[in-house]
Amino acid sequence: MATTWAALVAGIIGRTRMRGVSIEYRFAAPEHPFPAAVEDSVTAYRGLLASGIFALLIPAGSHEILLDDALRVAARAAEADDAVPLEITLGVPHVFQGFTSALYEGAAALDSVATILYAQLGSTLEPCGSMTDELQS
């Protein structure tokens, strides 16, 4: 698992008690020019679908440095009839989901992923609770 995303995946695992997957993709140019990252993301997404892991969610912030990449991944998946929900949160920066202890929107994004997991998997586990409740108090 990529170190950058470890906290985000851990946050989802903590909310759901389910196994998590983090995908690394080629990003650095000129070694891996555009659209390498988009192609890697779509390939990994299709691999997850083929293995029985369903479409989940692409959460991005409106001030996200990689917002265009998130839009391209969602569009490319839709072109191939592999639609994946894209959720854009207004006014938040890159990796806002990593600031769950201080940023309501970050906790809400991970809570949204956990809710989708429970709804689609029909989990018999009880949710671990919402961090957004803690941040509101």
Image (cartoon, helix red, strand yellow):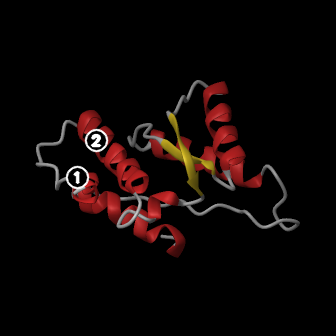
**Residue 91 image offset from top left, x and y in percent:** 57, 48
Vertical arrangement, residue 129 with respect to residue 55, above or below: below
Question: Which residue: 66% across, 47% down?
Answer: 67
Q: In this view, does 127 lie to the left or right of 108?
A: left
Viewer-proximal residue among 126 and 79:
126
Callout 1: few (<14), some (14-19), or many (20+) C-alpha neighbours within 10 Å? few
Q: Which of marks 1 and 2 is nearer the N terminus?
A: 2
Vertical arrangement, residue 119 with respect to residue 37, above or below: above
Q: Which label is found at residue 2?
A: none
The amino acid pointed to by label 2 is: Thr
**Residue 14 image offset from top left, x and y in percent:** 25, 62
Callout 2: few (<14), some (14-19), or many (20+) C-alpha neighbours within 10 Å? some
Q: Is residue 35 left or right of residue 90?
A: right
Q: Distance between the residues labelled 1 and 2?
A: 14 Å
- Image quarter (top left, top right, bottom left or bottom right) of the C terminus: bottom left
Q: In this view, does 106 lie to the left or right of 126?
A: right
Location of residue 46 by image quarter: top right
Residue extending farthest bottom: 3
Vertical arrangement, residue 7 with respect to residue 116, above or below: below
For label 2, the residue is: 115
Viewer-proximal residue among 13 and 40:
13
Location of residue 21 by image quarter: bottom left
User: Judging from the image, what secondary structure is the residue with disc 1 in?
Assistant: helix
Q: In this view, does 134 lie to the left or right of 124?
A: right
**Residue 116 image offset from top left, x and y in percent:** 32, 38
For label 1, the residue is: 133
Location of residue 106 by image quarter: bottom left
Viewer-proximal residue among 67 and 118:
67
Question: Which residue: 29% across, 34% down?
Answer: 120
Question: Which residue: 18% across, 53% down?
Answer: 129
Residue extending farthest front: 137
The amino acid pointed to by label 1 is: Asp
